Image (tube, rainbow, N blue to C red):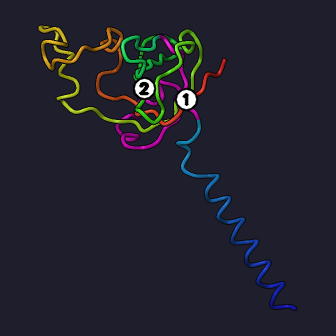
Amino acid sequence: MKRRDSFFYFFLMAAALLLFTYCTGNGKQTPMQVDEVMAISETLAGETVIVEGLCTHVCSKSGMKLFLQDSDQSITLRAESDATLGKFDTTCVGRQVRVRGILIKETIDETLHHDLTAKPAEIDGVDHCETEDTAAPSFHIAAISYQILN
């Protein structure tokens, strides 16, 4: 009987330890504002982040790009969807949105369309969204999920 009680208490303590370890994490799973993410973007590259901001635009061409702006409207961050998540809801525009995804540092090839001497389609043959040029050119979020907050 004592052996069974000891096992039960050991199991209960191990489960509690795992639960608290998982819940405390490293702090990156709490929602951050766009400017906070961009301030430490180099250290967050490749990590899963949760970003909140004002949705200023959903790409009308593909519906797979959503643009989040910080509170003082000085920084815009692009979130990109994939076939699994699908198109962003166009009712997001003008509302606070929370996006969960992986912060991706773009390569030189991905940012070539920001060349001011040529139109984007002339560089890589792909038609880019006009709002994309105002977004921070070096990082974007590969969206896993999103939520309209208000």
| Contact flag, marks 2 and 1 (Cβ < 8 Å) | yes
Residue 42 horizontal/vertical position (percent): 34, 37
- Is residue 48 a member of the stretch shown in magenta? yes
Badge 2 local density, few (<14 within 10 Å), some, or many (20+)? many
The residue range painted magenta reads: 31-56
Q: What residue does disc 2 label?
A: 79
Figure check: 69 above or below 98: above
Badge 1 local density, few (<14 within 10 Å), some, or many (20+)? many
Residue 37 horizontal/vertical position (percent): 45, 30
Would you identify the image quadrant in which residue 58 lies? Answer: top left
- Left or right: 135 as drawn, with respect to 112: right
Q: Which mark is residue 146?
A: 1
> Alpha-carbon distance for marks 2 and 1?
10 Å
Q: Toward the viewer: 35 or 6?
A: 6
Upstream in sequence: badge 2 or badge 1: 2
- Is residue 116 a member of the stretch shown in magenta? no
